[in-house]
Amino acid sequence: MRAIIVSAVVILCFLISYFYPISEVSSQDTKACFKCHSIKTLKKKLESAETLSLYVDKSKFESSVHGALDCSSCHPDISLKNHPTPKKIQSKRDYQRRISQNCLTCHPENALMKPQVHGKIVKSKEISCAECHGSHYIGSMKNWKKTVKVSQYCLACHKFEISKTLPSKEKISLKVSEEEIKRSVHKNFECIVCHSDFSKINHPIYNFKDKVHYRVEMTKICTKCHTDKELKKNPAHYAVAKTTPCIQCHGYHEVKSVKVVKTAPESQYCLNCHSRAISMKMKSGESLSVQVKESDLLASVHKKLKCSDCHKDFSPTQHPIRTFDSVAEYRAKAKEICNNCHKEEVGKYDKSIHAQALVKGNLQSPDCLKCHGYHTVAGIKTDRNLRMGLCAECHKKEMETFKLSIHHEAFLQGKQNAPVCSSCHNAHDVLTTNIAKISDLCIKCHKDVKSAHNKWLWNPPVRLSSFVDTHFASSSCASCHVKGQKAVYLTLYEKRKNKPFTLEEVAKILNIDLEKVKEKIDINKDKKVDSFELWQFIDALETKSDVKLVGRIDVIEPNEAHKIETKKVAVKDCDVCHNPKADFKGKLEINKEGAKPFRIDFDTKALNSAYAIPNISDFYVLGTTKIQILDILFLLALFGGIAVAVGHIALRALTAPIRRKRREGK
């Protein structure tokens, strides 16, 4: 009961002092405090190195709402008996927070919670009482509200580091910089011009789900003045405004004049919007980020270019609206931009397996943007690590195998002529390995390779470079320089154009569905083509087209070709291939548009058939892949030649007397 009476007396005293400030300090103790604290130079050095003024203006204090209180009412731990006592103070902010706790002695927390917004600030403890209300010169809130301007009233709280935590656990800052407002085109506006549902007596509380919801709702403020009719004057801006909240580009309170922005350098003008997280929608529903980071541009090989050097239809005075069906179409159109300067590279790319795959709908297939990026274009020619890394992003398995090769070992040693992916496969005109003639690219680095091979790769007593050329034409370098099983590959070609047939072309020639081509080749469906099946298939094609089979020896697993061994362990024995017991597999392959070739096993006995003579171009391996009729013809020719020579000599010997008598008779 006693505690209630004491609290009531304290509150009554406070109310009396609030409405009728006392002009003179009544307490003797308080007067004693002023003997020192009225000295203007009285200061204290804090642990944070800040300086805290201990001066209190007596007249201002007397006119404050606390003028009737003793100093000990707010500083209960200080009295004339124990003062001055050295006190550790960390910082000004820390001190304000500690002193503010004493406010609760007279201002119960439940009373502070009644004004909803004030209660939330008190509860959050982000701002102490002293930070907003001051320390010794606290005036009447009622009188202050009557005289202060609306914006200054708002800034009394919003100038501090206060924030709001949303249900999504995201935080939004509610701090407003007066300096930012002064620099804004809205500098002459009072807060309530935009925030029309706020006033000195009304402060609603919004409940936003997350930051996106917050931005969308805040943007509705802008549309009060900036109507659709006005925004449609700039179609590009209007399109962005319909997908991106205004404040995401223009900011919250430091909104600049658009006229000022247009005077900026072109790239800076573009970045004013594109540096933000904005995106464009495709007809397919896909979304593509059109954000551009200035740091990316400055690190790019295009750093000296203006935006309009690539985006020729755009400038500070025009910004056309473009629509795309999908991201794939956008990427295809972007290639046209690259073509303005890089015609040769784009032309090569258009013939590559990558381009064909993209046309067929494989969105993972590389194009200009996929490899070089949008605005982060790096100098790939000089950065060999980057060149290799680009391919490795998609071809991880191949990269792991390449790391086991002598080529990668040379790369790690820093040898400048050590090959990377594009050294063998080219950078832009990447073809399927069966038609890319990769062995020809090996010769670019290994210039003396023919003379080196001619030392052992010859047919005694004949030693000709053409003999080496024949082997190079029908055997891949990997077939001798990589361990592992080899195969005889027969690739279907068109004779006149000397280009590989595609599976799609075969289906069209035979007038069957693409899926039926395999059944046309493998009639008994045992997943292996025998001699009869192979030549029956070729006959069926020959009646409607001019076809041939091009043969070569290569490794069975294409990825194994990356694991090139040292020349010390390379094959240098003719008997490895030219041996009836040599174990070669047979692979029939037909190219596919934008994809790896279709392959199926065939029985190498098919090469013994007479059908092989007219149908397999420039390919004949004695031994395993022997065409027996050629061997027979060869032997007949050999023995025939010997017989003619022997017969001629014998005939000359037998007819010598006859010829001698004829001469004597003459």
Image (cartoon, helix red, strand yellow):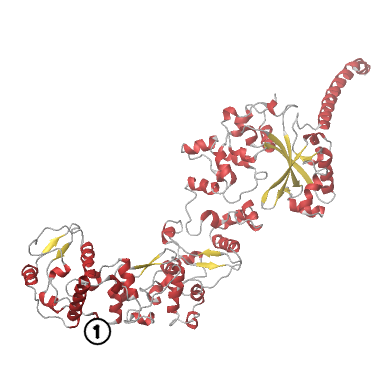
- Compared across the picture, whether 425 is left or right of 240 comes to right
Residue at screen point 35% across, 78% down: 203
Q: Residue at x 79, y 35 (%)?
A: 607
Q: Position of residue 521 (x, y in %)?
A: 80, 45
Q: Find disc 1 in the rendering and name its residue.
A: 147
Snapshot quadrant of residue 182: bottom left
Q: Nearer the viewer, residue 300 or 248?
A: 248
State which quadrant residue 61 falls in. Answer: bottom left
Give the camera-side residue of 148 and 117: 117
Work out whether residue 180 can be spotted: no
Q: Secondary structure at mark 1?
A: helix
| Residue located farthest toward the front when viewing the structure as drawn | 1
Residue 337's image quarter?
A: bottom right
Q: Left or right of 598: which side holds 322?
A: left
The front one of 599 and 265 is: 599
Could you tell me the amino acid type at mark 1? Thr
- Residue 255: percent from the left, percent from the top? 37, 74
Residue 335 seen in render: yes
